[in-house]
Amino acid sequence: MPGPKELDPSSSPRAMVGSELRHARESLKMTQPELAAPLFVSGSFIGQLELGTRRMPMEYAIKFDEILGTDGFFVRNCAAAMKSKYPDHFADVAEAEAITTAIKEYAPELIPGLLQTEAYARAMFRGGRPTATEAVIDDLVEARLERAKLLSDPTTPSFWGILDEATLRRRIGDATVTAEALRHIADLMRRHRVIVQVLPFSAGAHMAIEGALKLMSFSDAPPLAYLQSMGSGQLLDDPASVAQYELAYDLVGASALSPRDSLALVEQLAEDCDHEAQQP
């Protein structure tokens, strides 16, 4: 079997802390499950910390210094590793996206962040934060567009999105903004950069009906599932839970339109928005 991935500690504070955690653990000839046991977490969680895909909570940094005899190293460096321009509930997800090989995402209400245009993101953030300053909105939009650059690579990661029909029909901003957003999705589909299916209203009830779902796969780490709700989210690495959500995603995809029919619907709805925008 191939050995663990060699990290570049200079790539980020989190990568540096993760690399040191693995070095300290291996120096004591401890396995990931053995280090995980006193913290009541999984061995895969330790692996995610070592790979830099998860931030190290301060309470765990304290325990690592105690268990590994690292003389306060993790406590001293934990604060820098935890800094993020994203909300606490999403910071680990954004970091994981940067190294994932495949993303699957079900979106019940909004176009997924990686597929959003600047105007769509701005209108969405303004609608959700009506009293925020323009500087705050600018920062949020900038972070969103930075994430979207992930798809500038022609092949990696692969992206398969299932968008509820409500996502396409909901006006974010105005008809012009929504039309641009839909045409952007259609362009990505026509360039074969993403796979998108539309889940029509006629599909009725389904396994993901209660909320948004994101699945992320990695070349050298266990997959993750992310469940999002208003102002919060939950990142899961438990194999049984992730498998359950992978099944849910596949079943939702089985009820969705084909990519070809989905593209036709996306483009038709973009035209409808254009016609709406031209009305006096």
Image: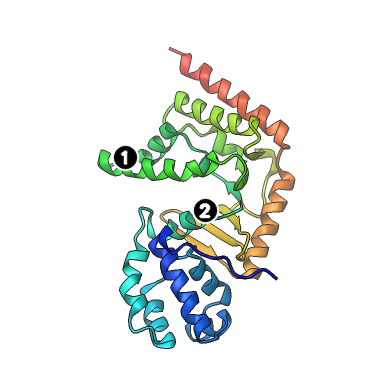
Q: Is residue 223 left or right of residue 92?
A: right
Residue 192 vertical placement versus 95 (above, below):
above
Contact (Cβ within 8 Å) of mark 2 with mark 1: no
Frontmost residue, 61 versus 242: 61
Residue drawn at 41 percent across, 78 percent down: 60
Locate residue 204, reporting x and y percent: 68, 45
Front position among marks 2 and 1: 2
The numbered mark, 2 or 1, whose residue comes first in the sequence reads 2
Residue drawn at 47 percent across, 14 percent down: 278
Look at the image and tell me in which quarter the C terminus lies.
top left
Residue situated furthest top in the rendering: 280
- State the SS at label 2: helix
Residue drawn at 51 percent across, 66 percent down: 51
Locate residue 110, reporting x and y percent: 51, 41
Frontmost residue, 225 versus 222: 222
Report the amino acid beneath label 1.
Asp
Q: CA distance from mark 2 to mark 1?
A: 22 Å
- Mark 1: give few (<14), some (14-19) or many (20+) Cα within 10 Å: some
Frontmost residue, 271 versus 57: 57
Report the amino acid beneath label 2.
Glu
Residue drawn at 63 percent across, 31 percent down: 191
Residue 172 vertical placement versus 146 (above, below):
above
Residue of label 1? 138
Q: For residue 97, which numbered disc appears in the image?
A: 2
Q: For residue 56, which numbered disc appears in the image?
A: none
- State the SS at label 1: helix
Look at the image and tell me in which quarter the N terminus lies.
bottom right
Mark yes or no: residue 128 visible.
Answer: no
Locate residue 67, reporting x and y percent: 43, 87
Count of number-bearing discs: 2
Locate residue 157, reporting x and y percent: 59, 48
